[in-house]
Amino acid sequence: MSISTKYDPTAAEDKWYSYWLDKKFFHSTPDEREPYTIVIPPPNVTGVLHMGHMLNNTIQDVLIRKARMQGKNACWVAGTDHASIATEAKVVAMLKERGISKKDLSREEFLKYAWEWKEKYGGIILDQLKKLGASCDWDRTRFTMEEDLSEAVIDSFIHLYKKGNIYRGVRMVNWDPTGKTAVSDEEVIRKEVNQKLYYIKYEVKSEGEPSAFLTIATTRPETIMADSAICINPNDERYTHLHGKKVFVPLINREIPIIQDEYVTMEFGTGCLKVTPAHDLNDYELGVKHKLPVIDILNDDGTLNDKAEILIGEDRFVARKKIAKVLEESGHLEKVEDYKSQVGFSERTDAVIEPKLSLQWFSKMDQLAKPALEDVLNGEVKLIPEKFINTYRHWMENVKDWCISRQLWWGQRIPAWYFQHEEPVVAKTKAEAIEELINRVPERREWSEESKAGFRKQAEEFITQDEDVVDTWFSSWLWPITVFDGFKDPQNKDFNYYYPTNDLVTAPEILFFWVARMIMAGREFTGKKPFTNVYLTGIVRDKLGRKMSKSLGNSPDPIGLIEKYGADGVRVGMLMSSPAGNDLMFDEAYCEQGRNFANKIWNAFRLVKGWEVDETLANPNQKAIAWFESRFSEALAEIESNFKQYRLSEALMATYKLVWDDFCAWYLEMIKPQYQHPVDAETKKITIQYFEQILRLLHPFMPFLTEELYHDELFGERAEMDCCIVADYPVIGQVNEILLKEAELVKGLVSEIRNVRNKRQISPKEALPLAIKVNSGLDYKAWENIIFKLANIEQIELVNDKVAGAASFMVGNDEFFISLGGNVDAEAEKERLTKELEYLQGFLKSVDAKLSNERFVQNAKPEIIANERNKKADAESKIAIITESLAAMEA
């Protein structure tokens, strides 16, 4: 191919992604290879790509591409979640634009519109993932509300109900007045908000005595009409005289008792608590304990109902402002103070959550949680990083029953059936429900067939199914099972081959929403864990540490970033700053650095491709070639170690340094021919081999650039299926430690000579003489062609003593001298050596302090202690040499 001066990511991305799809490189079917399986955390069908998705899916793609290159049967299953609350809100908004109200539609009509919306918009985020390079097996794409997956949800509900794990009852739930549905504790986001604390005066009922008032502090004056009691602490001497008394609720003058309970905090507010059992979880528990009436004054949409007696039909927050004014006018408001407190908001609609008593379906969690907790504690399922284990343990040991019903139409409908005033029947179909109605009553079982037929006819007409759907998470907790049809056919080939899956990559905030529940479902329904490793990414934040969000306007458009920097550049940028489990402080400059890295590789490729070959030349670069071979293996071992620990950011940085520093900045400079001169055939051949290994190493991180270069004629003719995406991943070779140490000394020498030139403003074109006093035993003559080339040295002389009047420096324990004639300032040289001596003495002091610290020596790893001792020996050696040099100058 013709090589342009600049890499064009757009052309490469479109071309190679289409090619990969066309050749089915992403597709997986069971075979004799080891499977490597990832299931995608299914994004909501309402979603568009955000920075969290970018990070999460880049990590998954890196893992899946690497496994594919290592010969594993890599299968990455994609899909989307139906997202009941969010999708229903989108559909309602769409209908509103068309002048249609949900309440005017039947369930069937509404669902028809919902499916229409899903078909139009539901695949947007998956198409965006393709722009990122995500190599999912798109042929396996699943949707949580497709027929087979929905059937599995219903089957799991029935299974748990028959085991006694699912029940129906009235409980206090988190109510979303905008979505008009219950939500789980995990879907409530706590935010600190500025509020008002209202001090309200309740008149104490007295017989013929002067009026007395009890002041109560509350942030919710609109709920006083739902008050059932005033509670005081029995130990509070301020209120001993009120024991057994009653008060009147302001404005409506209903009598309520004063009760005593140590639950009340004497220090908060006035030390008195208004008890509103219908609108606060703790008040509800107090109400149960003291047998108080429950007065629910709120409608499902957050407006006041008839039981409120006043302000009927007003929104709760409008009512709050109005009632405060009325209380003030009636003399019942003593004062108002500013107050900050935590308030719950619905994750889906951002509505303020209302605690509400509601008849709902619940799943008992205690027995389901035990094996799922054990899986993590015994290491069957590994949480990465491990710091999340304690958080997981705390949640699982204190797990509460799960409210699994939602007051929505979009979702899997609860398989419960109601007939007249009988207890509900849980069954898959109406026909099965009717048979259950007959079989569960002994008298009915004894009926004649004719009587049963009559009952069936009556029941067919009057039986109704529950209107609610199950919580979306009750669907997605089956995801690793249902994507392979493990419910529909537990013995099918795919399920037995791919399940349990290998790695799950997800966000810590859904560790309990989803991860814990998937482990529970895996154990309950298959007897196996669903995955082995859970890589928990951090939250993507901006440079100021704020979580990226649309509302703050601090989140860049991911597709815009890809268009600007290329998919490879963005992938590198995301991973450069994303250590596992720690938040990512994203800066667009990282993507620019990623793009620059792509251009660096492109330019290195152009350099090598441009070399002409002279077959008659001998290879003068054996040292450089041997060094880079060892350096590549050394770096690869480090990269593999990082991958095994799921330290992908560190794996990328090790790769980045190998390519930018070792290959481009050092190796290519060591071996490149002089300008407009040819290179020997062996050097170019081996360099091309190294370059191809680098492309393979880089491919999981930068798939488009590497595939583009991999097919250039420089690397030979490629067959149709000979692509970088399925090329063999590099294998760690032999590492020559001595050679690596020698090379570091030589690189240090070259850098020091360049520093001398810069400080003394000596042209790089001026060849300099070099004298070396060797203390290390290194054979510098064996490296002289590299030193000559990179440092422009005209000759190397080995000496036994110091060279008077020369610029001197040290690399390791070896001393180097460059004779500059009259250019050497003896006093300046003395000053430089003195400063270096002071620095080394301070450094030695800090190392000695560490090594004399018993706690450090006892607790540090052996290799760390050995490293500190090596530092000490090196510093002492350099100090001795500099001291000797300074003494010679004084002589």
Image (cartoon, grey):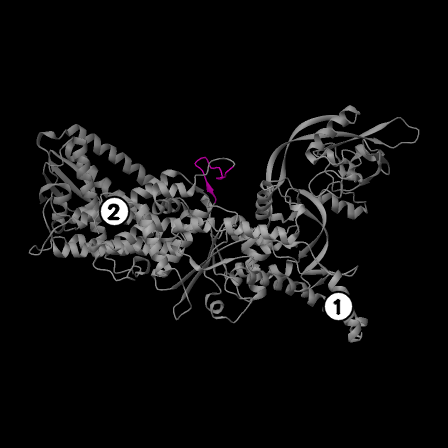
502 left or right of 739 in image:
right
Instruction: Categorize mark 1 by other alpha carbons within 10 Å: few (<14), some (14-19), many (20+).
Output: some
675 left or right of 850 in image:
left
Instruction: Categorize mark 2 by other alpha carbons within 10 Å: few (<14), some (14-19), many (20+).
Output: some
How many labels sit on residues?
Answer: 2
Q: In this picture, is 889 found above or below 715?
A: above
User: Which residue is nearer to you in this view: 267 or 848?
Assistant: 267
Residue 708 in sight from this viewpoint: yes
User: Which image quarter is the C terminus in?
Assistant: top left
836 left or right of 41 in image:
left
User: Which residue is nearer to you in this view: 655 or 802?
Assistant: 655
The kind of residue tagged 2 is Trp
Report the span colored magenta: 539-550
Q: Quadrant of residue 268?
A: top right
Question: CA–CA distance between discs 2 and 1?
Answer: 75 Å
Where residue 203 appears, as percent x and y from the top left, is 83, 30
Q: What residue sits right under mark 2 in the picture? A: 602
- The dominant secondary structure in magenta is loop
Q: Residue 456, labelled with which disc?
A: 1
The kind of residue tagged 1 is Arg
